[in-house]
Image: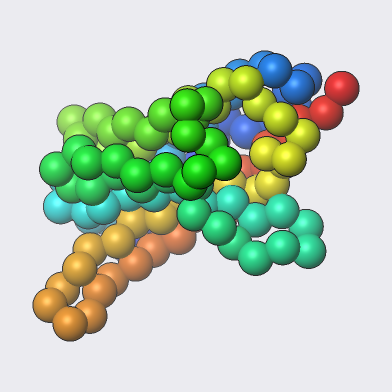
Amino acid sequence: QVQLVESGGGLVQPGGSLRLSCVASGIIFSNYNMGWYRQAPGKQRELVAVISSDGNTNYADSVKGRFTISRDNAENTVYLQMNSLKPEDTAVYYCNARQNRGITYYTKWGRGTQVTVSS
């Protein structure tokens, strides 16, 4: 059974930092592209950052220079280091695992962790 479990969310003041973690089980983690997405109230889910199976990264323009995605294949974990947080970063953050399989793909989502940036 494939599971993604996020942790590390919480309440932080503007300018503060948080580190999110996502532990995967039931998959060969090193074979998967991993990503963080977020969904704010009343808005669509959006990409925050992704890291490929070979370590290439990509970020949404809104978080470039502030957020860093990384992975530890030995621990089956992907991280999102978030610095200089802004109120507009407030959202539920979801972990995603994706493996491309020819013309199709397999994807799995975690349940999410709430991040609230407020003074």
Report which quarter residue 113 is drawn in: top right
Q: Residue furthest right?
A: 119
60, above or below 110, in the image: above
Task: Judge whether residue 6 can be spotted in this image.
Answer: yes
Task: Judge whether residue 4 can be spotted in this image.
Answer: no
Front-most of residues 50 and 29: 50
106, above or below 54, in the image: below
Residue 83: image x %, image y %?
57, 21
Say left or right for 84 vs 34.
right
Q: How is the image coloured?
A: rainbow
Identify the residue at image location x=29%, y=33%: 71
Residue 7: image x %, image y %?
54, 35
Q: Residue furthest bottom?
A: 103
13, above or below 77, in the image: above
Say left or right for 24 vs 110.
left
Front-most of residues 85 and 29: 85
Residue 9: image x %, image y %?
63, 33
Front-most of residues 42 and 30: 42
Identify the residue at image location x=62%, y=21%: 84
Q: Residue furthest top?
A: 16
Quick one: quadrant of the C terminus? top right
Say left or right for 96 vs 8.
left
Report which quarter residue 15 is drawn in: top right
Q: How many numbered callouts?
A: 0
1, above or below 117, in the image: below
Quick one: quadrant of the N terminus? bottom left
Residue 109: image x %, image y %?
45, 60
Identify the residue at image location x=34%, y=56%: 97
Q: Residue furthest front?
A: 61
